[in-house]
Image (tube, helix red, strand yellow):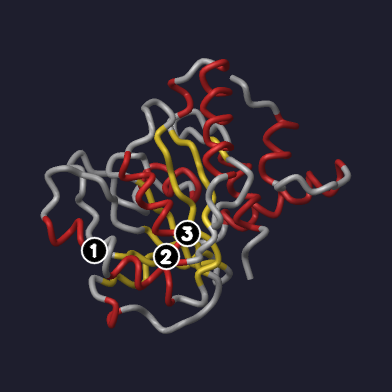
């Protein structure tokens, strides 16, 4: 694994100059946040169905089958929080989860599935764009990329859409257990290059595996830094 404790901490804390004690405290804050109860409380298929504005929201987005549901389950330590489906494009609404009253996790529909109906594809240009652009409580979008495969045009299109919506997004590589250290290092460097050319991109890349647990504490710490 290319990951080490120090590298993971640096990834999680976004380059802050913190003492070892402060770094440990940040990881502990992430652990405690995600030890809290996480429950589904709202689903919306139309913009007018969105729940009332509340606390900070963090949305998770990615191509169909990128491992989004598995990652949400790994983060929260709950095997059934988000449904893992063998059918790409199954999630067709915005699903809202309350994490300990401090953070709202939003599971967005997957994109880029070739067999999805035209209406579902249009959601990302319609409802999803309107949600991204018009939700003041949305603090960041975690944009998941499958580390095992090449970047797809659909991913580039969504990054452009996020730039236009002026919503900060952070790239998160998934399924990194399938890569050897050198290949993972190349993927991280590629993602860093992508972040540099997108105005809305957060510059620090996270890499995760729901299977091995790689990067999960780092991602928890990053999210804890954004929580209420």
* Sooner in the amino-acid sequence: mark 1 or mark 3: 1
User: Which numbered circle lies on residue 79?
Assistant: none
* Sooner in the amino-acid sequence: mark 3 or mark 2: 2
Of residues 41 and 112, the one nearer the viewer is 112
User: Which numbered circle lies on residue 163?
Assistant: 3
* Sooner in the amino-acid sequence: mark 1 or mark 2: 2
Of residues 113 and 77, the one nearer the viewer is 113
User: Which numbered circle lies on residue 123?
Assistant: 1
Q: Which quarter of the image is occupied by the N terminus?
A: top right
In terms of secondary structure, where does tag 2 sit?
Answer: strand
**Alpha carbon separation for disc pair 1 and 2:** 21 Å
Disc 1 crowd, CA 10 A, few/some/many (<14, 14-19, 20+): some
176 lies left or right of 204: left
**Alpha carbon separation for disc pair 3 and 2:** 25 Å
> Which is closer to the viewer, label 1 or label 2?
1
Q: Which residue is found at the position 38% from the left and 45% from the top?
A: 156
The vertical placement of 168 against 64, above or below, is below
In terms of secondary structure, where does tag 3 sit?
Answer: helix
Q: Label 2 belongs to which residue?
A: 97
Q: Which residue is found at the position 28% from the left and 72% from the top?
A: 44
**Measured from the top left, where is residue 198 in percent x and y?**
53, 50
**Measured from the top left, where is residue 10 in percent x and y?**
73, 39
Q: Which quarter of the image is occupied by the C terminus?
A: bottom right
**Alpha carbon separation for disc pair 1 and 3:** 17 Å
Q: Which residue is found at the position 34% from the left and 78% from the top?
A: 50
The vertical placement of 172 against 189, above or below, is below
**Measured from the top left, where is residue 23 in percent x and y?**
79, 45
């Amino acid at each position: 694994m290319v990951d080490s404790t120090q590298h993971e901490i640096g990834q999680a804390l976004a380059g802050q100059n913190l003492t070892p004690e402060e770094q440990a405290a940040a990881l502990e804050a992430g652990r405690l946040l995600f030890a809290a109860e996480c429950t589904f409380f709202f689903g919306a298929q139309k913009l007018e169905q969105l729940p009332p504005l509340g606390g900070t929201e963090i949305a998770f987005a990615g191509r169909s089958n990128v491992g989004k549901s598995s990652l949400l389950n790994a983060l929260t330590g709950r095997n059934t929080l988000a449904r893992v489906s063998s059918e790409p494009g199954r999630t067709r609404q915005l699903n809202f989860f309350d994490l300990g009253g401090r953070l709202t996790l939003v599971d967005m529909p997957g994109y880029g599935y070739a067999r999805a109906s035209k209406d579902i594809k249009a959601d990302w240009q319609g409802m999803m764009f309107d949600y991204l652009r018009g939700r003041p409580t949305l603090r960041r979008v975690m944009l998941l990329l499958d580390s095992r495969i090449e970047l797809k045009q659909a991913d580039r299109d969504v990054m452009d859409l996020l730039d236009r919506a002026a919503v900060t997004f952070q790239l998160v590589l998934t399924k990194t257990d399938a890569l050897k250290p050198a290949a993972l290092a190349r993927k991280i460097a590629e993602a860093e290059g992508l972040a540099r050319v997108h105005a809305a991109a957060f510059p620090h890349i996270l890499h995760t595996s729901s299977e091995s647990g790689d990067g999960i504490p780092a991602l928890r710490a990053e999210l804890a830094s954004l929580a209420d």
